[in-house]
Image (tube, rainbow, N blue to C red):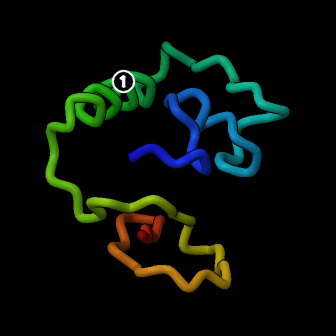
C-alpha cells in the first residue's frame, strides 16, 4: 500500500529535500549526455524500471552513503558499493 511519507513518482523522489546532493532547490541539473556515464545511467534506469535484476537490497526504503552515520534504528539489508540500504 502507498504511504504518504513517500513520493509517488521517480522525479518527486529525486527532488525531495535532502535526498540527493546534486539536486539544488528542487532542480535536477541538465545531464551531460555526451559522456559515457550518461549511457550507463540510461541502461541502469531501464533495467530498474523493468525490474530486471535481482536486488541484494530487496524491500529497501532507506539508504545512505558509507561516509554518513545516521542514528537510525532500521533493519540493515545490504551494503552495495558506497551505499548501505535499510528497511
Residue 3, horizontal then vertical, whole percent: 52, 48
Placement of 29 over or under 64, stated as above or below = above
Q: Nearer the viewer, residue 38 or 19?
A: 19
| 27 vs 74, nearest the viewer | 74
Residue 12 in the image: x percent, y percent? Answer: 61, 31
Dividing the picture into quadrants, the one containing residue 68 is bottom right
Horizontal relation, residue 30 to residue 78: left or right: right
Left or right placement of residue 15 versus residue 55 in this view: right
Looking at this rendering, what residue extends furthest in the top direction?
A: 34
Residue behind mark 1: 42
Residue drawn at point x = 68 percent, y = 34 percent = 15
Q: Quadrant of the C terminus?
A: bottom left
Taking depth in this image into account, of 80 and 76 the one nearest to the observer is: 76
Total numbered badges shown on the rendered structure: 1
Q: Position of residue 55 (x, y in %)?
A: 22, 56
Name the foreground residue: 74 vs 56.
Answer: 74
Classify 10 Å Cα crowding around label 1: few (below 14), some (14-19), many (20 and above): few
Q: Is residue 70 above or below residue 80?
A: below
In the picture shown, does residue 73 fall above or below 59? below
Q: Residue furthest right?
A: 25
Please determine whether, in this image, residue 11 is positioned above or below residue 72: above
Check disc 1 and report its element: helix, strand or loop.
Answer: helix
In the picture, measured across the screen, residue 72 lies left or right of residue 84, that is right
* Residue at 29%, 30% in the rendered image: 49
Amino acid at each position: 500500500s502507498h504511504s504518504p511519507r513517500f513520493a509517488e513518482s521517480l522525479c518527486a523522489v529525486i527532488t525531495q529535500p535532502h535526498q540527493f546532493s546534486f539536486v539544488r532547490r528542487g532542480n535536477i541539473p541538465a545531464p551531460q549526455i555526451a559522456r559515457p556515464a550518461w549511457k550507463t545511467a540510461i541502461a541502469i534506469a531501464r533495467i530498474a524500471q523493468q525490474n530486471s535484476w535481482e536486488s541484494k537490497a530487496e524491500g529497501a526504503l532507506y539508504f545512505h552513503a558509507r561516509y554518513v552515520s545516521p542514528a537510525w534504528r532500521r533493519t540493515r539489508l545490504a551494503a552495495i558499493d558506497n551505499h548501505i540500504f535499510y528497511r
